[in-house]
Amino acid sequence: MVITLTVYVTKFDGTRQPFDKSKVVRTCVRMGATRDVAESIAEEIENRIYDGIETKKILQMIFRRLRKRKPVIRHQIDLRKALSLLNPAPDFERFIQLLLAEHGYEVTSNQIVKGRCVEHEVDAIARKNGKTCIVEVKHHYKYHTPTSLDVSRISRAVFEDVTEGYELGLNDLKIDYALIVCNTKLSEHAKRYADCRGISHIGWSSPPNRDLQTMIEEKKLYPITFLKGLNTKTRNKLASKGIVLLRQLTGKSSKELRKQTGLPKGKLESIIDKARIILSEK
């Protein structure tokens, strides 16, 4: 009789869960691998893991194998980490505003809206399908940090106050709902409260089929931080000119970017070339 022992992996928060080969396959496919290549890599990794292995080590194993089979991987980092490297404001806020606009929202950024009690600075007003929402953008540098219940509570409180302000004639915005967009998962409490209070949310891995990663990959709206080796100084120079997407890089010449940012032409040409390679392979 053959006894199969369950191998457990250790997540970032220290909890353990059984190794799931299908998750490795999905990760590879999301990064551009074919199904056959993804399954081959998952098989290799399954044969090399050990009980208690950290999930970050598995991700490193995936990257090493993908680089051999798909050279474009050499130019990029993990998307989840890339999002965490954006500055919260204004860069990540700008990134989300562009993402929503690409998905059919009419977006007005950084608005002051008078509520019944106080004025509120909201990250964006977004309109789609005849509905208007206030957008709360939340960013975490540590991408394993869940977005907390307080964010849902605040969104609800702002929604109530600006709605009452509209009813009293203090503002001219009829808000239909609140929307939270974040680069991490929402905590279970935050999701339960949001669902109960009618607050929409877009986060890492939720809601199903309309999560942040899916929305980015559908439109190829990768952040500039997706480029491997992009240092903080260069990133900040680009972002200071409103450039937060790889697509924005490829839409300009090195001469234009040099004039805008003062960065060396050679560095800019290298960055643009890598951005083009990534976008052409996605």
Image: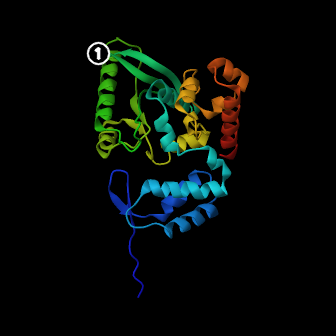
Q: Quadrant of residue 8?
A: bottom left
Between residue 195 and residue 244, name the one nearer to us: 244
- Tag 1: Cα neighbours inside 10 Å, few (<14), some, or many (≥20)? some
The number of callouts visible is 1
Q: Amino acid at mark 1?
A: Arg
Query: What residue is drawn where x is 69% and y is 35%?
Result: 270
Q: Is residue 104 left or right of residue 270?
A: left
Q: Is residue 31 above or below residue 113?
A: below
Query: What residue is drawn where x is 43% and y is 17%?
Result: 111
Q: Is residue 186 above or below residue 157?
A: below
Query: What residue is drawn where x is 46% and y is 66%?
Result: 49
Residue 238 position within the rendered picture, expressed as x and y whole percent measured from the top left: 58, 25
Q: Quadrant of residue 116?
A: top left
Question: Can you identify the residue that label 1 sits on?
Answer: 116
Q: Is residue 51 left or right of residue 47?
A: left
What colour scheme has been applied to the protein in the rendered image? rainbow
Res. 279 in view = yes
Residue 182 position within the rendered picture, expressed as x and y whole percent measured from the top left: 42, 36
Q: Is residue 167 left or right of residue 43?
A: left
Res. 212 in view = no
Q: Quadrant of the N terminus?
A: bottom left
The single residue placed furthest to the left in the displayed view is 117
Query: What residue is drawn where x is 63% and y is 44%?
Result: 75
Q: Is residue 276 left or right of residue 3?
A: right
Q: Secondary structure at mark 1?
A: loop
The single residue placed furthest to the bottom in the displayed view is 1
Residue 205 position within the rendered picture, expressed as x and y whole percent measured from the top left: 45, 47
Residue 242 position within the rendered picture, expressed as x and y whole percent measured from the top left: 57, 23
